[in-house]
Image: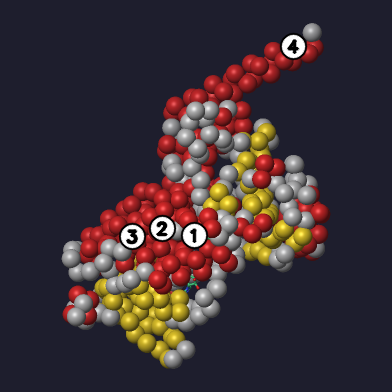
Amino acid sequence: MTNSESAGQDYDVVISGAGPAGSAAAVLLARRGVRVALLERRSDPAAHKVLCTHSLTANAYPVLDELGLVPALEKAGAVRNQARWYTRWGWIEPRAAPAGPELPYAYNIRRSTLDPLIRSHAARTPGVDLLPGHRVTGLVREAGRTAGVRASTPQGDRTIRARLVVGADGKDSAVAKSAGVPARLYENTRFAYFAHFRHLPLPGGIGQTWFLEPDMAYAFPNDDGVTVIAVLPDKERLPAFREDLEGSFLAFVRALPEAPPIDSAERITKITGMVDHPLHSRRPIAPGVALIGDAALTGDPLWGVGCGWALQSAQWLAEAVAPAATGRGDLDRSLVVYARRHRRRLRGHQYLAADFAKARPFRPVERLMFSAAARDDSLARHMHLFASRLIGPLRFLNPAALAKASAVNVKHRGAAVIRGKGSSG
Ligand SMILES: Cc1cc2nc3c(=O)[nH]c(=O)nc-3n(C[C@H](O)[C@H](O)[C@H](O)COP(=O)(O)OP(=O)(O)OC[C@H]3O[C@@H](n4cnc5c(N)ncnc54)[C@H](O)[C@@H]3O)c2cc1C
């Protein structure tokens, strides 16, 4: 008899949602001796999230590595992500320092490849029972805490009891709603449309991002020779944009500086998107409940950080709760440890992203950092570390970095004045 059965549970942990967050958490918990039920509402093994542009920032790499997925991703054709960013001051082109280490990276990989890969990895992990076709519809409550889930399945409704219920069921999380965990919403005043293309070469074969103040766009090469292009204009443009969606999308892309050659490419998906995408934040714990991935925090798609944070939050949760989840420790205390880490690592990023989602002009500090990064390689690398979410806002905007950026800009202005004098004289 297992520890969980003896305590009246079917499993130690039940996870709602087998996307990146839920599948990663299942593997990382099970490897620590936790008995996991991984419930997924969809039955199709190929099921995947369609509304995603699937560039995984470099903060995802250590988790992918711990999961043991890096070789499988590379074999599946995942593209190591490198990108250059257009700004009105020129391109920011992060590259490794001459004798320095290579820049941290993760992968661009379509969700149709990633989701089945990570889910099947979870299903093969001893200690994980993947239960497809199980939609979580409510929670079992006992003595003021959650003690399991109710799920609808093709065979009828069932109850699964566990010490801990993990909501990894996305931004509209059924677990968060049933546990009464409210979401704090931040308006996003951009809308997004994207499509997949073949035969669309990009300069240097790497990702391109355009900061057009306030509009945004990006293009990323993915597995199987597919390039995704996304445009994220200010919502003020939405009524006119929608009048002719395809024409507007193509015109927007054609007008980009160093525009990708979209007219000679083959579009292989329809133009998909969303016009309303507020950012969400939820307290990631409640008695007997933990939230990970988008269920805890949904960022702004334009930064492409959601999958990385889904994987990282799964890792933080597994590290914090594994012993207590098997009955060897104080579960509530371990949940607080997880919540603190989640907050410490993500709150500042979400605060800045919510402010940037207002589609307002660049703030002075953004002008300073973006202009200097376009002019100086070490600041371009610094910006890459921030965009990869390997450093937080405080390190990104530390006094030494701000002083360096100011010095770069002063030097640039000085050089421009000398050039001006030279040409007039
Ligand atoms: C337009 C757009 C572009 C984006 N681009 C990027 C990008 O380039 N890079 C990036 O990193 N992120 C991007 N994101 C964000 C990214 O898609 C999410 O952050 C990521 O999918 C979160 O993973 P998750 O596992 O938490 O949730 P999900 O991927 O949403 O997975 C949730 C899983 O739970 C299942 N589920 C839901 N409800 C239930 C239930 N009641 N019972 C059982 N199962 C349930 C679902 O079927 C699904 O399998 C983008 C998002 C959008 C909207």
Which quadrant holds residue 146?
A: bottom left
Which residue does the image show at 70% across and 46% down from the upper left?
A: 202
Q: The residue tagged with tag 2: helix, strand or loop? A: loop
Residue ID for mark 4: 421
- From this viewpoint, is residue 184 visible? no
Residue 243 image offset from top left, x and y in percent:
79, 64
Contact (CB < 8 A) between labels 1 and 2? yes
Residue ID for mark 1: 72
Q: The residue tagged with tag 4: helix, strand or loop? A: helix
Mark 1 or mark 4: whose residue is earlier in sequence: 1
Closer-to-camera residue (338/328): 328
Q: The residue tagged with tag 1: helix, strand or loop? A: helix
Closer-to-camera residue (379/242): 379
Q: Amino acid at mark 1?
A: Ala
Q: Amino acid at mark 4?
A: Lys
Nearest to viewer (mark 3 / mark 2): 2
Residue 366 image offset from top left, x and y in percent:
56, 36
Residue ID for mark 3: 317
Residue 337's place in the image compared with 142, above or below, is above
Measured Cα–Cα span from mark 3 to mark 4: 60 Å
Q: Is residue 3 left or right of residue 352?
A: left
Measured Cα–Cα span from mark 1 to mark 2: 8 Å
Mark 3 or mark 2: whose residue is earlier in sequence: 2
Residue 346 image offset from top left, x and y in percent:
42, 50
Residue ID for mark 2: 68
Measured Cα–Cα span from mark 1 to mark 4: 58 Å
